[in-house]
Image: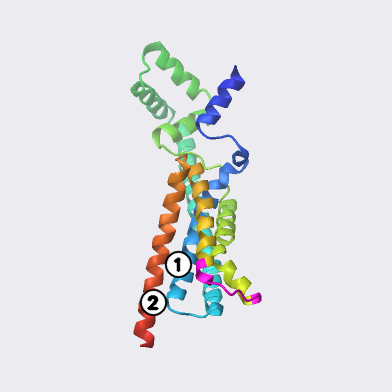
Amino acid sequence: MENKEAYNENTLHKHTGFLKKYEKYLGEFVYGGIDGCVTTFAVVAGSVGAGLDSAIIIILGFANLLADGFAMSVGAYLSNKTRKDNYNKHKQIEYWEVDNLPELEREEIRVIYKEQGFEGELLEEVVNVITSDKDRWVNVMMKEELVMFDEDKSPLVIGSVTYLSFIAIGIIPLLIYVIDYIYTINNDLFLLSSILTGIGFIIIGWLKAFVNQTPFWKGILETLLLGSIAAIVAYFIGDFLERIIIY
């Protein structure tokens, strides 16, 4: 019976399948990949709109890929680390208050659970159970009073996953230009790049839907729309600047 209930709960929350193993950092991978693919494709589209040579597109694309990816990963690392540091700071304050102001903190526990509907002997029993263990007491205060939750993900891993996904997905719009640089391709490179990028958007949109637990078609369409708008804007800006500068 327990296995059936666990299965049903996991199914409802979409915590099944091969992605479950990587779910912890999947969000960082998805948003790093989206940003990488969108920004790199925008660089490619803007460069094509400006009539730049393939070699220049490769240079600009990889410069964006490596620099922006690093900046995004550093931002993700610092943001997560700041949250963890802030949580630990307030947790130490709560420990000090429990040690030095126990009656005040005990009353705060009583008020918290009274507001949740506990009263009388049951309320006092709940208060006694919680305050009988200092760690439990502090954890309850963190969650119920400060509404702060411990982040169990490593800031370093978050930054690394973000950078790797930015590179892995962001390189897709450039692949056809790199191949053409090595082996000449007698086709419309931008069209081929757009097709490959579209496939990349579909994959990352599907993962985005998995992370947010929304319909897959919605995640794919949102990602495709975002990438298309970025590419169209970049293309026409590149074309506009080319006309101004050259002509």
- Where in the figure is residue 199, as x and y percent of width and height? 53, 56
**Which residue lies at the image location 56% right of the left edge and 59% below the top edge?**
169
**Which residue lies at the image location 63% right of the left edge and 40% below the top edge?**
18
Q: Is residue 74 visible?
A: no
Is 17 located above or below residue 45 in the figure?
A: above
Query: Mark on residue 42?
Result: 1
Q: Is residue 209 visible?
A: yes
Give the residue type that dot 2 points to. Answer: Asp
Along the line of sight, which residue is nearer the eye, 114 or 243?
A: 243
Magenta-span inclusion, residue 184: yes
Quadrant of the image occupied by residue 228: bottom left
> Which mark is in front, 1 or 2?
2
Q: Residues within 10 Å of mark 2 (few under 14, many from 20)?
A: some
Is 246 located above or below residue 84 in the figure?
A: below
Residue bearing the label numbered 2 = 239
**Which residue lies at the image location 37% right of the left edge and 72% below the top edge?**
236
Q: Which residues are magenta?
A: 182-191
Give the distance between the C-alpha atoms of the residues marked 1 and 2, in whole angstroms. Answer: 13 Å
Secondary structure beneath dot 2 equals helix
First in residue order: circle 1 vs circle 2: 1
4 horizontally vs 93: left or right? right
- Mark 1–mark 2 CB contact (< 8 Å): no
Is 28 located above or below residue 184 in the figure?
A: above
Query: Mark on residue 240?
Result: none
